[in-house]
Image (tube, rainbow, N blue to C red):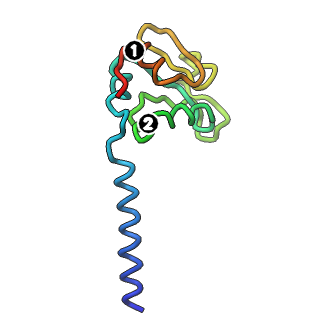
Amino acid sequence: MKKWLILAVVVAVGIIGSGVYLQTRPGKFDDFAKCLDDKGAIFYGAFWCPHCQNQKRLFGNSQKKLPYVECSTPDGKGRTQICIDKKIEGYPTWEFADQSRLSGEISLKELAEKTTCVLP
């Protein structure tokens, strides 16, 4: 019985460890996402928005590097003050350093063209 318990703990630690590694390993678009941030681009979205999830998925593991602002309150029923102040009406909305905006799911190519960031 003790051997099975030790084996179960070892397997659990291995599974948890591999999950942590997959979440922290560098993503293909890390530098691109950092460049978007450096160029003043901001991605406004809501956790419950399917188009925002699609936009994030384009970045794969690099989505954690995005200059993202959550516009929804935790209960999903209201908006955060920053998004009210910025007059963000739909999601996703990208705002750029020149104050221009693009709404909807934006291709990586279009984001690259708008910011001069280089795609990998």
Residue 17, relative to residue 65: is it above or below? below
- Residue 65 % position (x, y): 38, 34
Which amino acid lies under the numbered mark 1 shown in the image of this protein?
Thr
Give the mark nearest the N terminus, 2 or 1: 2
Task: Count the marks.
Answer: 2
Which residue sits at x=41%, y=12%? 97
Residue 118 location, quadrant: top left
Mark 2, residue position: 63
Residue 7, relative to residue 48: is it above or below? below
Which residue sits at x=54%, y=22%? 106
- Residue 87 % position (x, y): 59, 16
- Residue 69 % position (x, y): 48, 29
Mark 1, residue position: 115
Seen as rendered, the residue at the extreme right is 77
| C-alpha span from label 2 to label 1 | 17 Å
Location of the C terminus (image quadrant): top left
Along the line of sight, the residue nearer the viewer: 118 or 88: 118
Which residue sits at x=38%, y=81%? 7
Along the line of sight, the residue nearer the viewer: 10 or 88: 10
- Residue 25 % position (x, y): 33, 47
Task: Give neighbour class at mark 1: few <14, some 14-19, many 20+ (Cα, 10 Å).
Answer: some
Marks 1 and 2: in contact by CB < 8 Å? no
Seen as rendered, the residue at the extreme bottom is 1
Q: Secondary structure at mark 1?
A: helix
Which amino acid lies under the numbered mark 2 shown in the image of this protein?
Gln
- Which label number is shown at residue 107? none
Which residue sits at x=41%, y=18%? 112
Along the line of sight, the residue nearer the viewer: 31 or 77: 31
Q: Secondary structure at mark 2?
A: helix
Location of the N terminus (image quadrant): bottom left
Task: Give neighbour class at mark 2: few <14, some 14-19, many 20+ (Cα, 10 Å).
Answer: some
